[in-house]
Amino acid sequence: MEKQKILFESGNEVAAFAAKQINYHIMGYYPITPSTQIAEFLDQMKADGEHDIVMIPAEGEHSAAGICYGASTGGGRVFNATSANGLLYALEQLPVQSGTRFPMVMNVACRTVSGPLCIKGDHSDIMFTLNAGWIILFANTPQAVYDMNICGLKIAEAVKLPVIVAFDGFFTSHQKRRCMVFEQDETVQKFVGEYHAECSALDLEHPVSIGSYMNEPDVLNNKFQLHQAMEEAAKVIPEVFAEYAEISGRQYGMAEGYCTEDAEVLLCLLGSAYHTAKVAVDKLRGQGKKVGVFTTNVLRPYPAEELFQYCKNAKTIMVGDRQDSYGAMGGNLSIELKAMLQEHGKGADCRVLSRVYGLGGRDFYESEAEEMLLSCYRADTPKFDYLGKYSGDINMQTQQYFAPISEKEASPGVTQCVFEGTDRQRAAKVQGGRINETTAMPKRLAPGHGACPGCGIPVNVNLLLRGIEGNVVLLFQTGCGMVVTTGYPKTAFKVPYVHNLFQNGAATLTGLAEMFRQRQKRGEYPDGEITFVMVSGDGGMDIGMGSALGTAIRNNRLILFEYDNGGYMNTGYQLSYSTPKGAKSSTSHVGPEQYGKPFFHKDMPQIMAASGIPYVATVAESNPLDFIKKAAKAKAYAAEEGMAYIRALSACPLNWGDKPNLERKVIGAAVDCCYFPLYEVERGHTSLSYDPGEKKIGVEQWFSMMGRTKHLTKPNYSCVTAGIQKEIDRRWEILKAKAEHEML
């Protein structure tokens, strides 16, 4: 047995530690709770010089999976981590990788799949992958997460299939436990051995075509070979587990059980709940009940023979599913166990009961495991049910928390926007919009939401809506703005509101806006005008950029409003493509080998302007009058010509590392150093809204006001700061040139 040491760490931490010890070539990643920490921990170790893994931040989980697939075709070792809807977004890529037989390891911290949106743990995500052709190991402790990450790579490379290491989100991913890890990275690297890919897209002497087009019978043969690889995996997995036991002292089986030998009643559970149930088993055994519990450590290939050995003597088995296969009278664990028993001729003399439990992270207690076991002794126990359910009251009336805002109330006439000129010179002119006058506008976003002190989101949303008179329908993409305003069953919105996921907000709002116009056209909806506004932030214009650009190219008549808070704040401040260069975040640490985010922020307003939409603008709460007037313009353009895009620099004191009462000054400094210039692009013509002139400050002064960038003011980072200043000045000069020369 090799030398080991004790760590008191979570499942996410030891997954990252195992990856560090393996020293993968590439990690493609995108943050999503609760798997995000794996990339965060790896980045911290990267900053400290502990590994050589190239960490590539993708703009979404689909791209992260593509990065990993592309890297795997290059003959190296590849790593990833995701959860929930991120896993589903990447799902399209999974069969591609298994079908072309390139190994890698992906950790899945299992979480509830939306909708409704819930970030807590259950198994509704991992069950979508059962047919993806990936080997799936399921770890029920942080220790098992570490061990299976090491074994998983060796298994993947032995059978040329990718591997998922799954575990319970929050229960296993975040709970710290005593774990044994190898003292030396070399021990792990020796165990997994060197990897020699059978083929590589980088082999210029033997060029191969990967992912060829296929018809029958080749497709049939390809899928059959994948099946054969899974059968081979069923042999390899126990061998690798046994080999690992020799160096670690920890033996894993395809499945495992507790007090199953003479058990008349058994409970089958997946993940961390297995250990809770063992406590209940001990209690009932003390009362003379012959009960036991078993679980599976492998979901694919399905360990039918190993599972049968644990349940062959039972008279009743209760299967607990942390997800439901709706309409099948049980989740996937139940369905497959029933099929296994039938295959072994035990379907008739063993009663199988199913319970769905623990959805949305609902805790599973020893008392519930006890009740599940005891219910197996009752003849009238339902075959299928939900544990701890509430089906609702059909007589309950939906509560409306706010009185509706009438069009008259929302149209006090404090801003009027008219178009003047013709052709290229045609532009919108705003009358009114003074700050004191716009207080007459009703607040569509009510106070009492859960935003952090100093958060810029409600400030910016309310400023935007001050300039938009008349009826408004809002759509929020996932992010802090959504999470803090719509905690069920209450809402902070006084107007109609829709939520959809990060990557598809603009397309969703397009569908709603066009449905409104089509129903009006058919006489199904009253005449009148609605301004449709999509609100995005927290990196939503990374993962949602494709949908946003599609909407821009179609020039759909709506407003896209982005609160730019410079990171994925809703998941704990990971870097986004809008994070300033050099800023530290939970995936751009500062250390001997890193100075923070290594590349410049994305210029989304210019990207949108290049799409040809009629109106683009930047705004800031430090210049509120300018903000309100641009909102009024956006409404006018969306009503008459097409899509309008507005971007606001939005404060996040929690993650920026400044004080909530100083946010307006911090925002103002960003404007004065021209990191965030104020301008607008109307029908292709650029005009500056604010030129700091002699008031222009250096970016270092702005950096000094925030904890995330204060390190850049130190002499050892002077070259980095100078480079950032040069790029800011370059972008500012280009912007001024566009404003001065109409043809640019």
Image: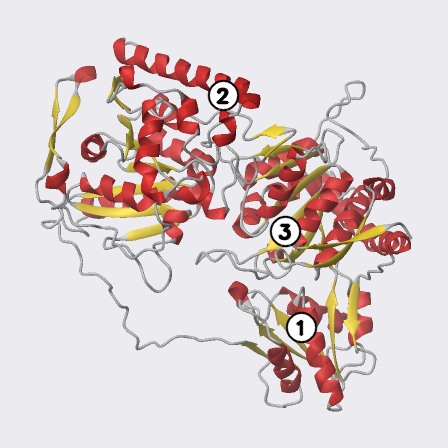
Pointer 1 or 3: first along the chain:
3
The residue positioned 26% from the left and 68% from the top of the image is 399
Type of amino acid at the residue the image marks with label 3: Val
Per the model, the C-alpha gap separating discs 1 and 3 is 21 Å
Q: Where is mark 3, residue-wise?
A: 108
User: Is residue 674 rendered to the left or right of residue 622?
Assistant: right
Q: Where is mark 2, residue-wise?
A: 721
Do the residues bearing badges 2 and 1 touch, measured as CB atoms within 8 Å?
Answer: no
Question: Is there any visible trace of residue 203 in the rendered image?
Answer: yes
Which element carries disc 3, helix, strand or loop? strand
Q: Where is mark 1, residue-wise?
A: 276
**From the viewer's perspective, is residue 495 above or below residue 387?**
above
Question: Is there any visible trace of residue 742 in the rendered image?
Answer: no
The residue positioned 70% from the left and 77% from the top of the image is 279
Camera-side mark, 1 or 3 = 1
**From the viewer's perspective, is residue 285 above or below residue 151?**
below
